[in-house]
Amino acid sequence: MNRRFEDILMPVADAGAIMHPEFALLKWEALGNRLDVGQLCYLKRDTSRSRRELHTFDPASISKDRVKAVRKLIAQLSEKSDAGGSRPATVYLDGRVVINLLNWADRRGMHQALCARRETEVAIKAYFSALRELASQSKLSVNSAAAEQRTLLSVLKTYFEADDFGADLRPFRFRRNRVVGTEVPDSERQGLLIAWADAVFTGLGSNVLQFTPYPFVIGGAAGQTVQVLPNHYGRRDGDASWGLKGWNLKTGEPRTYKELKQRYIEEGSKYPTQHASTVVRTTSNQIKEANSNARASIRLAHAITSAYAFAVLFLAETGINLSQLMEMDWCDDLVNSVQSPSVVRQKFREVKYRAGGVEIAFKVSVAFMPKLKAYLALRGYLAKDATVDKLFLGADSVGKAANLNAQFMRHFYQRLESLGIVLPEITPRQWRAAKQDWAISNHGPVVAAGIMGHTLDTALRSYSNGTDAAHKSEMGAFFASVEKTVLEAGVELPGSLNSSVGACVKFQSPESISASVAVKPDCKSSEGCLFCGQYRVHADATDIRKLLSCRYCVRLTCGRVETVEQYDASFGTVLRRLDFLLDELRKRDGALVASIENDVDVMGNLDPFWESKLEQLFELGLA
């Protein structure tokens, strides 16, 4: 049979009041996808087809235990949605991995999964083995398997309220070279957007609040200016569009009847007089309406554009993520808090207020405080005729003021383009990466992780890419030494000694490959050997396994650093050196490297030296 579907908007006030979890389709305002958790109530189902209406269910297979479990799962996802700090997509993924597990388990008769802890642990152990098998056959990437395994464990630990759930399971470790950190936008791109966002926020916002007349001019980056007109027409085609023919876009002045008539004659119009008169009248009416009505549609539209610009400035200033930005509630108490913020350190202020029974706090610089106060006044203007409950506002589908949505950056760029401002795009995640990059450079990763509100491991792995220029001198040194370092298989090295990462042609005579590389050559450590001018590596199975095994162990320990200097000068540089050498070996025998890489990273078959090293790391609690 097919079954009924009922949309449930997340978060829900009381999951226990949901009468029919078997019908449930969870949805989030900021997310297009819906999550079909209701399907899990039927132990026999076929959901293999992509279209939901083609899914089939055995009505006799509905399980009371599973209905109870699904209701509990909805409550858990709802609570996480309501708590804030997690994007809707993150909560959706939590539910998605549980559905994946139960689809797999139910097909194998493990129907007590999610209903009882012991049976769930049995099911997830078998499921992990299945994921490992898929990864070993290259049917699933290691990182995808690792992400699903770790998310499942996190969700089910919370679900069963047991930190030791699945304690004997060993999920995949992420292959760090496959996790691509967020690109930090270069300073020129950041500067352009900040300059124009500031100009648009200040220029349009003050025009709205002070009720100054149209047209007017705003100045942005590099001395450029833009004429702001009292109409909604975009400038992609310049003044060739009918709505802009009445304006001189360079001066911001209305064109005269004489100018327009001559233009229509030159364009071959049959009715130049009538067309010129119509455009003059329309332009005049636009100016009259905008300058006589404080809530004219053009002023409201420009107020929303100004609000978008402030949201961009706030992202750049604080580095919070998009979900947190959208979920910040509004409360009248915020106005008082902004007038008397707390001093957290020199040149920084912390704003605290309570909204919805929850304390909200954020830190901004002293220089940013006037902008925040101006935005609160602008928000008051927008909220006058709107039903909104969030701090940050944007526009709904018909252009009226509404709570900010996840697409606001795209809308902001479109509005900039309508003003004739075309800029390279920077995503909210890239702004967060830029803030992280600044925080790490100035304070170190531990402090930066606290400022940004995520773990140290996340700070180093996902946001700390830095700009391309940061590693150029280092890579230059690698390239300069590659010809003598990487050798073809079978090349003999008389008098050389085998090492844990390859071979040494002159033991106890370390020679730095470049002064620009932070790691110094050292005959007492494997890592130091990699940066020595006496080091050699062959494009054969033995040396390739040594390098891959070394990388495997380094990855296990690099998350334990406490300063950016320690990470970048040691682990970061070592991993980049290893990846560089492996890339060079791939150029010589890509198939061999790929085969051994899978054997080491997936199957765990390390070189004997590194196998013993790994055991030591586990015994010492360092991995």
Image (cartoon, grey):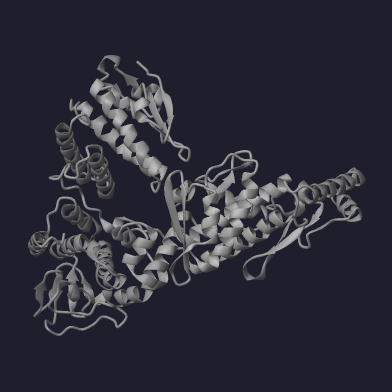
Asked if one can make out residue 25 in the rendered structure from this viewpoint, the answer is: yes
Residue 215 rendering spot, x and y as whole percentages = 77, 57
Could you tell whether 81 is left or right of 478 in the image? right
Q: Is residue 241 depicted above or below 457 in this figure?
A: above
Image quadrant occupied by the N terminus = top left
Q: Is residue 551 depicted above or below 270 in this figure?
A: below
* Among the 4 quarters of the image, the one containing residue 156: top left
Image quadrant occupied by the C terminus = bottom left
Which residue occupies the foreground of this view, 327 or 242?
327
Could you tell whether 253 is left or right of 386 in the image? right
Tell me what residue is drawn at x 90 percent, y 46 percent.
277
Could you tell whether 434 is left or right of 206 in the image? left
* Among the 4 quarters of the image, the one containing residue 422: bottom right
Residue 115 rendering spot, x and y as whole percentages = 21, 29
Residue 377 rendering spot, x and y as whole percentages = 62, 54
Q: Is residue 53 depicted above or below 199 in this figure?
A: above
Tell me what residue is drawn at x 69 percent, y 55 percent.
209
Asked if one can make out residue 233 in the rendered structure from this viewpoint, the answer is: no
Which residue occupies the foreground of this view, 115 or 570?
115
Which residue occupies the foreground of this view, 371 or 197?
371
Residue 293 rendering spot, x and y as whole percentages = 77, 47
